[in-house]
Image (spheres, helix red, strand yellow):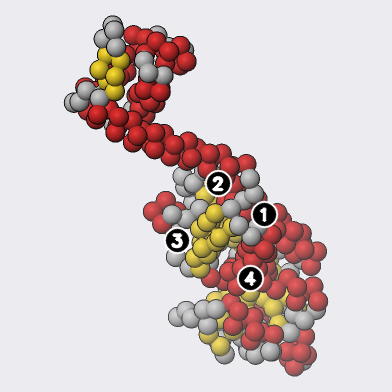
Amino acid sequence: MQNLNDYYYFVQVVKYQGFTKASEALGITKSKLSRHISDLENRLHVRLLQRNTRKFAVTAVGQEFFEYCIKILDQVEAAENFVEQSLSSEPSGLIRISCPIGLVEFPLGNMIAKFMQHYPRVQVHLVATNRKIDLIEEGIDLAVRVRNLPLEDSDLIVRELDAWQHVLVATPELIQQIHEPIHLDNLAQLPSIGFHVPKSIWRFQSKFDTVNQFQEVEFFPRLKTDNFAAMKSAVLNSVGIASLPRVFVYEELNQGTLVELVPEWELPRGVIHVAYTSRQGMMPAVRCLLDYLIEEFKKLSCQNHKII
């Protein structure tokens, strides 16, 4: 393994045309400086300098090697300057982030677009996928995930962003067509929208239950899809009732275009969180996006609580 210190010492000796002046400039002894040059020559198996008590000269190979060393040291300095500027200037560079498909549609896609508008020197590669990402293997800086509680053990750093809770919703127009109070016993008879699964079940727990007892309702969807946007569109068009993440429908609930059904019952909770390998050494752009997402989800959560 090359020792860049030896390259640096060699360059100084050549620049000062001797060990005496170079050692004074570097603040080290002549013997230590000479030992570094000797180690370098021994490793390269070549004589770089001709020196004795009366004269000092750079060999032909030494002169060419000196030119290479200058370029190497200039590149090292440029690399260090780049890192220093990156850590102190406006966030810039490439950020790789992964996120479940549903969250990209809302709200993460919109959050990232606003972030990029605010920081024009930032580039983002957004991977929309529902599979579990290996951050290190796939070079991902931040992974937004949705998990049920409790979270599994991991070597990653995890920051909670928001609760992930589904709510059963319908339009006021559809509710008016039903002509009877809606409760758990008649939910299965209502037109519904659900996922592509062999058996569609809503699993409810009373908000006032302290012993974690659940009640399951099997239903038979008119529309089956794996896409939250399609489900939401169908609900808004009164195709049926559906369980949707509250974070997807908080505006509609706030405006009254959707209504939460059986509000005394709740569906299982999860958590939206962001995972990353370490905050230490994190590039400013990545750190800035992380802090931005935490704040934006905090605002979203406050808006959600107003309508619960």
Judge whether 58 appears above or below 244 on screen: above
Residue occupying the point 55% across, 61% down = 124
The type of residue carrying mark 3 is: Lys
Q: Is residue 50 left or right of residue 171?
A: left
Instruction: Measure how far apart labels 4 and 1 are at the Cα level.
Output: 16 Å
Residue, disc 2: 283
The quarter of the picture where the N terminus appears is: top left
First in sequence: mark 4 or mark 1?
A: 4
Nearer the camera: disc 2 or disc 1: 2
Question: How far from the left and from the top, in percent, is residue 70?
Answer: 39, 33
Q: Is residue 131 visible?
A: yes
Residue with the mark numbered 3? 132
In this rendering, would 43 be left or right of 261?
Answer: left
Mark closer to the chain start, 3 or 1? 3
For mark 2, give the secondary structure.
loop
Residue type (three-letter) at the residue carrying disc 4: Phe
Label 1 crowd (10 A; few <14 / some 14-19 / many >=20): some
Q: Nearer the viewer, residue 48 or 149?
A: 48
Dot label at residue 292: 1
Q: Residue 258 in the image: x percent, y percent?
A: 75, 80
